[in-house]
Image: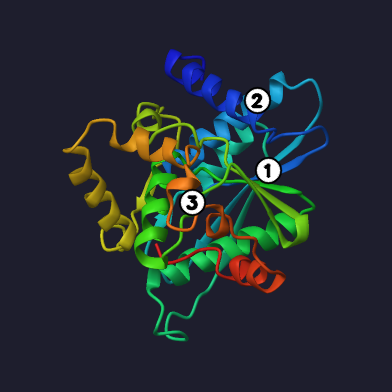
Amino acid sequence: MENKTFRKLYQKAAGTMIREQLIAEGDAVAIGLSGGQDSFLLLDILAERKKHLPFPIRLCAIHVHLKEIGYEYNVPAMEKYCASLDIPFYCIEESVDLSINKEKTTCFICSWTRRKKLFETTHQLGYNKLALGHHADDAIETLLMNMIYHGSISSLPYRLKMFGGRLILIRPLLDLSKKQISSYSPACHPRPVRECPMTHNTRREQIKKLLEQMERLGPQTRKNLFRSMNNIFPEYLPHGWNTCIHVPSPEEKTQHENDFLRET
């Protein structure tokens, strides 16, 4: 992990963690290890970060496998890799009945179930934070998805308190682009046995294609879309601050938590 590419990515993510105060003394951080490239980079970065912190933290990795979906990862190899980093690994197998709610897509049910099990397992293991491998491109895509499909301006925050603060989501990779992350792919990372068959048939994939078209208008499209979320001029919105900032009610917060994984 001492190559130049990793050091550059680590320094960027470490800066994000410091600036956004994502890690504190005594934290127990569970890492959502999907098995993809993003999640393995997150694992490596947090393992490295732990070595340099002036206080102790606990780490573990959680992988959720849904039997009926059709994708498969090399779980023994994942466990072995986590052991090499001295990080406890937990694989949670779950069955899901795709016929229960025919109004929801397979991707929605899969995502919602996996995230729910991540939350539950993190809490059951006594960890107070859950680290996810979302990056800048994920945030941009989510922004556009929520604008187009839900009529709201919202995306992926660096940190988010869930369930009254009992669980805090953190996203240390949010300042990194997919392109930057793709530059780091060491041979020691386990590879998927079988990719998800639904990968290319989702709303998020449609948004990715839209972004590619938008980039033809300007090479800074992705960078500027990400910057726009911290560069809001409310006086130039139809109703200014009156409707720009929405304070959710307790009922809305509960609904948001239940609906946390909108359709992907």
User: Three-letter amino acid code at disc 2?
Assistant: Arg
Q: How many marks?
A: 3
Q: CA distance from mark 3 to mark 2?
A: 26 Å
Please name whichever residue, 19 or 115, is drawn nearer the observer in this view of the structure. 19
Using the image, tell me which numbered label, if any, was put on residue 49.
2
Residue occupying image coordinates x 66% and y 26%: 18
What residue did someone put label 1 on? 60
Asked if marks 3 and 2 touch (Cβ < 8 Å), the reply is: no
Residue 70 appears left or right of 45: left
Q: Quick check: 263 above or below 144?
A: below
Q: CA distance from mark 1 to mark 3?
A: 26 Å
Please name whichever residue, 249 or 102, is drawn nearer the observer in this view of the structure. 249
Q: Quadrant of the C terminus?
A: bottom left
Q: Quick check: 56 above or below 139?
A: above
User: Three-letter amino acid code at disc 3?
Assistant: Ser
User: Three-letter amino acid code at disc 1?
Assistant: Cys
Spot occupied by residue 128 in the image (x, y as percentages of width and height): 76, 49
Residue occupying image coordinates x 42% and y 85%: 99
What residue did someone put label 3 on? 155
